Image (spheres, rainbow, N blue to C red):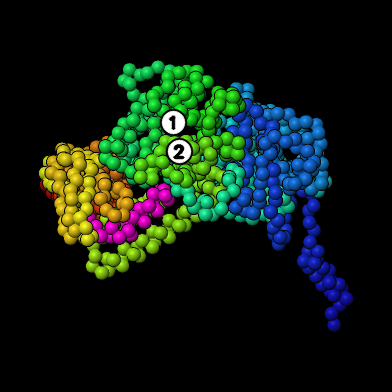
Amino acid sequence: MVSRKLILLGVFISVLLFAPMVYQSYDLDLSSNYQSNSAQTFTGAKILFDEAHTKNGSALWTPGNASLFSALLTENGHESDTNFENDLDSTLLSNYDILVLFFPQISLKSSEVTAIEDFVENGGGLLLVGIDNQTTSWLYTPEHLNSISESFGITFNLDEWSGTANDFDDHQVMQGVSSIHSNSEQHSACSLSLSGSATSVALYDGNSIVAVSSSGSGRVVAVGTLAPFLMYNEKVNLLESRYDHHQFSLNVIDWLSGNAHRTATIPERNVLYVGDGPNLTPAQIAEYKIFTGVYHEHTTHSDGAQDPDEVLDTAMDISLDFMIPTDHSYDVEPTNQRGGITGAMAMREIAKRNGLDIHIVLGAELSKGKHSVAFPLTENVYTNIQQEMITESHNQGAIIGLCHPTIDPTYAPVYEEFESYDYDFIEVDNSGFIYGSGEEGFSKNFMGASDFHDRWKMNTMLNVLFIQNPTGPDGSISDADIVDAVLNRRIVIIDKINSIVYGEKVWVDRFLEMEEETETSISTATTIIQQEEATGTSVGLSRLYLRWAESAFDYMSYGKSLRYSNNSISPDSIGIDIEIASPEEFVFEENSAFDVTIDITNNLDYEISINTSLIKATHLDISPINQEQSIPDGSSVSFTRPAQLTEPGFVNILINILDFDTNDDLMPVILRMGGIVDVINFDEELDETGTTVQVWVPTQRDDYGQIKSATLTYTDSSGQEYSVAMSPRIDGVRGEITDYYAGETLDLSIEIVDYAGETYTLTGTYTVQEGAPPLPLMPIIAVIGIAGVAAVVIVIAFRKFKGT
């Protein structure tokens, strides 16, 4: 029989084991390691960002509801507004669940402080974000937060820290976050001092930088660094995990709104609306055509990296409808008479001469004062007086915008007097630097600036304009159309660096619809062309249009992509075949001569005429520039241009096919041919491990951006095959082979791939010239062994001889 003591002991142990399963104790102190119940239902919060207390340009650094921060919150189920001018009173705050204040530079009224305290007491969430206390530069301070924060036991210190923090407590605000940093480009951070119920959840160098508190049924988060709410795609190298700032930002809002922790969903595309735009019916919206272009880019006529013709070449590659080059001009005309509008003038002349389907606007970046871009200009403006920049531009009928307002603090006074200066627009996004400028689009006209000074990057910042009745030739865009679209806010900015689509809702939504329509159009065109080819019909012109439609779509130039796609399946396009007859191979012998011949066949039932214009031919002497011929129905005509190679490199031939005298209105289309001169050079370098052979295919500076990749494959005398990647450089495509010696013969194959996806193969054989091979190890050992044995024999013999 079991004793009573054993039974009681068993009951006692059972209580100890199972009591935690029956009753769970929750820590209700919101300032400690609070974790929301993961089973609770998510409730999206309505958030109010405040910009009514900004000054000296601080609005440009304050994210609101047109920022990457707000886009992240929207993606994760929250919504937000921005307060630009109203007092933070109880009536306003009653419409929101969370208030966000970034380092106000105007002191809050005592009535506002009271309203915020009551807001938190009654269950509201409050996010306070500080900045370093600046005695130079922008002169910002976190001090004005303290009139609010000290009510919750938190003081923003008037100090500075800079670095990456990873010393975190186990609190929901820091859950899933491995680091945050202080670097918001031109600003750093401050530390926090705590008292009362306030609790630190993140430290840097032993000092609090993130703290939580509570009052009544509300919660407060204080953060000493601005960077986690701005720097989502910049300075990520300072983070331990790529998406730490995303996760931290969401954690803060979820905790303030009483939601459980969850992993942040990162937006694939950040859609930022700055107002609804005009109230138009779908039928009215459909009347607008879209035109895609680049604004604010430079050439070698000022400080750009490439000549005007090279920049124009890239503009055509990415299927732009328009471009606004803006080289710098200053207060006096330069002695070389280059700068300002001269780069754009050179581009416009090339486009006109070759009948290119792009509109070039004469623009300039007036750069002796605070930089401002004006267009369309008829002549350069030379002045160092800010107001004269604007007045003289307006006198030419141009509009003018304030450039990159966050580039340095001296721009702040001009920004604050934006309306007084009579600016027409502002750059809300310059080469991906948007920070807190997005909300400027609610009250100002706006554009997105490329400003990379390098043609290879300019496709990452586009402006899409909506034009109802284009006034340019043959339905193309004109200067007046562009100005009208900017001034009436019919513009969408595409920032591919930050995956942003920005503008008024009506136009952003239409752009996104056009994306789907264009993709469907390309798919339909592909099917139709394949069906034609299945019947044995050769449709070279249709294929050419379709390739450009696909390329334009990839670059997000949807208007031109749709026009290419429609052209590809027009009856006249299907009835015209285009074929490159020569050269047959695009790996050219050095100094060779050959014909560049295009055969065009007219399968229509009427005679047509076509013009071909040579836009560009690198490393070649080739003529003529223009060739126009009539092609009777049912016949073919060859367009032949004799060519002579002048130097090694990547050969790039661009021919514009235009002036189709057909029933259908066919748009110009570029036929591109690429090739490489068959020259392989070798250099050797000897060290203790053997000979390194440098293998390189010579190219010229202009070729650098044409070559995407290259691979060197070689086989040595043992029959072993190896492959190494080669690097495209300014002077050639280079790779190296290591650890061989004189006499080793290598069979080489080099595959070069250009950005059009074409592959060119060069082959050759090379015998290593330098480096004596080391003696084989076994014979050396054998010799040493024999010598050793011989020595022993000699010694023994000598001793025996001596002993006798």
Q: Residues within 10 Å of mark 1 (few under 14, many from 20)?
A: many
Q: Which residues are magenta?
A: 555-579
Q: Residue at x 23, y 62 (%)?
A: 538
Report which residue position mark 1 lands on.
Answer: 375
Position of 393 compared to 532: left or right? right
Q: Is residue 771 visible?
A: no
Position of 352 compared to 108: left or right? left
Camera-nearest residue between 666 and 497: 666
State the SS at label 2: helix
Q: Check if residue 570 falls in the magenta segment.
A: yes
Camera-nearest residue between 788 and 159: 159
User: Residue 62 location, x and y as percent?
Assistant: 62, 36
Instruction: Please tell me in which quadrant of the rendered image residue 330 appears.
Output: top left
Q: Check if residue 175 falls in the magenta segment.
A: no
Measure the C-alpha gap from mark 2 to mark 1.
10 Å
User: Predominant secondary structure in magenta?
Assistant: helix
Q: Is residue 6 above or below residue 674?
A: below
User: Mark 2: which amino acid?
Assistant: Ile
Camera-nearest residue between 458 and 664: 664
Residues under numbered marks 2 and 1 in contact, where contact means CB atoms less than 8 Å apart: yes
Report which residue position mark 2 lands on.
Answer: 482
User: Residue 190 location, x and y as percent?
Assistant: 65, 32
User: Residue 281 location, x and y as percent?
Assistant: 56, 53
User: Residue 404 location, x and y as percent?
Assistant: 51, 31
Instruction: Please tell me in which quadrant of the rendered image residue 635 appears.
Output: bottom left
Q: Residue at x 85, y 82 (%)?
A: 1
User: Mark 1: which amino acid?
Assistant: Phe
